[in-house]
Amino acid sequence: MNVPPDQAQSTRRFLMIAPHFPPCKAVAAKRAMCFARHLPGYGWEPAVIALSEDVQRDPILVPLTPEVPMYRHYRSGPIAWIEDHILTRFGGRGDRAVSVTKPSSEPPSAERAISPWQVLNPAHHLRQLKGLPFDRFARYIPTLIPGALRFLRAHRCEAIYATGGPFSSFILAHLLAKITGLPLILDLRDPYTVDPIYTGRWSALGLKIARSLERRQMSRASAVILNTITSRDAYIEAYRDIIPAERFTFIRNHFDPALFGPLPEPPSAEGAFRVIFFGHLTPIRNSCLFLDALRAFIDQRSLTPNEIKFYTLGDRTSQDGEYTRELRLEEYVEALPWVPFTESRALLGTCDLLLDLTSERHYMRISGKLYDYLAAERPILCLSENPEMTLIFEQTQAGTVVPNDISLVTEALSMYYDMKRSNTPFRSNHDQVYQFSAKPASAKLATLLDAATP
């Protein structure tokens, strides 16, 4: 049984394979960082294998990086040396960037017409294999294994935990578990072979290869973690009669209150109604539907730019910019400079409504920004097709979730606009919001580690 942090008597070690780890600013680093910060309070300390400290380095995260044993050689060995010191001299470049499996913007391959030329073209089939676990870091695994073995043995690791992406981290973890006989825990975070967002670019052969690798890894694992109930259930169904259902579990992403600054004063009834989206817009997750709803709401109320503003942080697509101009919303929409998530509460806490966007294809996912929003304690308007979101918002009373429907989004904007003008205070359920923070999540992972290592 786990004990509170102030009662932990002894600490055991486990190997954490987390290519994204602070001070890396990739969104996946937040999950690994929270676990590394709080697991010692529940009896477990990670010894971490990660990418070099200079990969997507965020200076703000440097003092927040947990002081745990580190082996920052996930990308290393002779191949990396050749890429960095030889190929760059001949016009190539050492690719040191963080790699994740990029989602397909196309429909699944089964729905796309394949020409006879594509059937006979090997390059077409190779392109469809992109996104498989053989990502750009898989080529370093053979030379990484000896050092990883020395590292985990030196720190007396009792279990192996891997989080993705890149999905090559599961290949490494599986091989190390087979060599050492240690228990294996796989933390997929987002779903993989059951999600058309990834598999949409694969051929039937590509999907078969990915499923075969995944099945072997999950058959070896003592626990397979997803970050939503919806994706957990999708895996239970996909591997019914192959892998026991109880092996699949979920630990949602979460926020660490200690990483944020103090809450600002909430906005008053006066001034512009401020709606904000904190994140990067992409072709698969753009703001166009929300802009339609915003335009409709503005026209209904005859609002001026002084009465309502929509702010975005992060990247915007050309489609977002073009649609803003097409709807004549240039004076209502403003792009703000990006701020690190540790500074987000100071900005989000001054806004009237926090916007969470997911497309119809994200029906198994919960966006990472939801947890930063929960930390800000302001109303959230979530556009989602995931039925799990309705349950979360009923529990936390953190705002409203609606499907991607213009009229429903417009109604929600109207409700929150009136709440502001009437100075109605907003109160979420703090006890339930706490369940989405780092300590309860870490306690759940510690329970899995305890069960894997009796």
Image: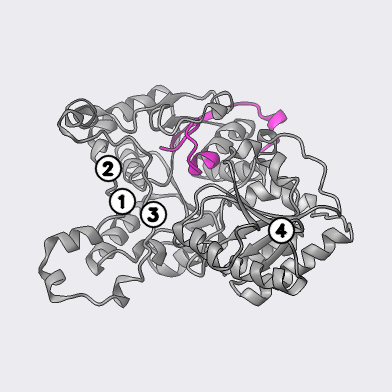
The x and y percentages for residue 65 are: 54, 27
Mark 2 touches mark 4? (CB < 8 Å) = no
Left or right: 418 with respect to 62? Answer: right
Quadrant of residue 425 within the rendered picture: bottom right
Q: Nearer the viewer, mark 3 or mark 4?
A: 4
**Element carrying mark 2:** helix
The x and y percentages for residue 366 are: 56, 58
In front of the other: 112 or 432: 112
User: Which residue corresponds to the image point at 23% horizontal and 40% vertical from the top-left?
Assistant: 139
| Sequence-wise first label, 4 or 1 | 1
Quadrant of residue 81 within the rendered picture: top left
The x and y percentages for residue 293 are: 64, 70
**Mark 2 and mark 4: span between their CA atoms?**
51 Å
Residue type at mark 1: give it: Pro
Q: Residues within 10 Å of mark 3 (few under 14, many from 20)?
A: many
The x and y percentages for residue 232 are: 51, 61
Q: For the magenta stretch, what is the residue range?
A: 2-31
User: Which residue corresponds to the image point at 20% horizontal and 30% vertical from the top-left?
Assistant: 88
Quadrant of residue 43 within the rendered picture: top right
* Residue to which mark 2 is pinned: 138
Mark 1 touches mark 2? (CB < 8 Å) = yes
* Image position of 83 with respect to 321: above or below: above
Left or right: 225 with respect to 300? Answer: left
* Residue to which mark 4 is pinned: 305
Q: Nearer the viewer, mark 4 or mark 1?
A: 4
* Residue to which mark 3 is pinned: 218
Residue type at mark 4: give it: Pro
Residue type at mark 2: give it: Ala
**What coloring was used for the rendering?**
one colour
